[in-house]
Amino acid sequence: MTEKQVQLLYFAAVAELVGHREESLSVQADSIAALAIELEERHPSLRGRLKNVRFAVNETFVHEKEPFADGDVIAVIPPVAGGSDLLPSKERVAIKTDKLSLETVCDLVRHSGAGALAVFVGVVRDHSEGRSVDALEYSAYETMALKEMAAIIDELEAETPVLRLAAHHRIGPLTVGDDAIICVASSPHRDAAFVAGRALIDRIKDRVPIWKREKGPDDDRWVGWTEDESPG
């Protein structure tokens, strides 16, 4: 197995257990979960403790099954005082070019007071308005899209404070059956989660600068342009 050189950052109680705040390591792990096991072997003081921490790769929270690359900076983050359900909205939205993870998005809004999770997954289908569709290509004004998605979450959570919302959108080429967007709403009860989840996807589709190009056997078209306006 190829070794990777990574920079580990430790904080608060984890730093105290390890005895320092950072170190450079050569590791054999190919996922965050495997890295956790390797860290417990290197630092016996961490054994049994890492199930309660979160990992961030290059300042982005990741799920335990996600891989990491040579040269990455990996932070080991113990529970914060306010609880994991208080991540700011900008850390609960993402524009990604790789496969979306439903579990990752759900984990962003889970908390001890959430009795309901309402999930919307937008999937690439093989037809649109009577046309056959072979594939889609999404493009985005990424920095603005992320800000607008976070703003939408802030608006909805201000309207109903018990909500927690998250959304990940994929861009680039997608084929039939791929997940294009995942929106998740959590709340104490299901009614609020259903309503908020619907509002979240509706506002994203209405306001966020992400564009979709449909590719079929006969032609390509940008969704939202009329036939006379379409440049292709």
Image (cartoon, helix red, strand yellow):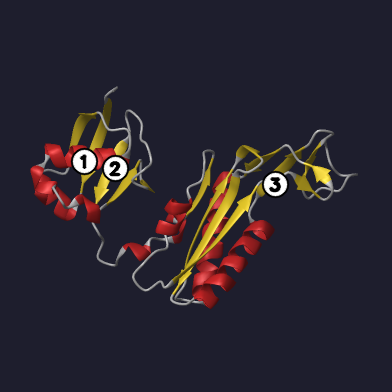
Whole-number angstrom distance, CA of label 1 to CA of label 3: 40 Å
| Numbered mark located on residue 125 in the image | 3
Amino acid type, label 2 = Ala
Q: Quadrant of the N terminus?
A: top left
Q: 114 above or below 103?
A: below
Q: Residue placed at 61% from the left, 67% from the top?
A: 198
Disc 2 and disc 1 in contact, CB within 8 angstroms: yes
Q: Is residue 140 left or right of residue 131?
A: left
The quarter holding residue 44 reads top left
Q: Circle 1 is placed at which residue position?
A: 37
Provide residue 3's location: percent of width, then percent of height. Answer: 26, 24
Q: Disc 2 or 3, which lies upstream in sequence?
A: 2
Provide residue 188's location: percent of width, then percent of height. Answer: 43, 76
- As helix, strand or loop, the secondary structure at mark 1 comes to helix
Nearer to us in this view, 111 or 15: 111
Amino acid type, label 1 = Ile
Nearer to us in this view, 149 or 183: 183
Q: Is residue 179 left or right of residue 92?
A: right
Amino acid type, label 3 = Arg
Q: Circle 2 is placed at which residue position?
A: 33
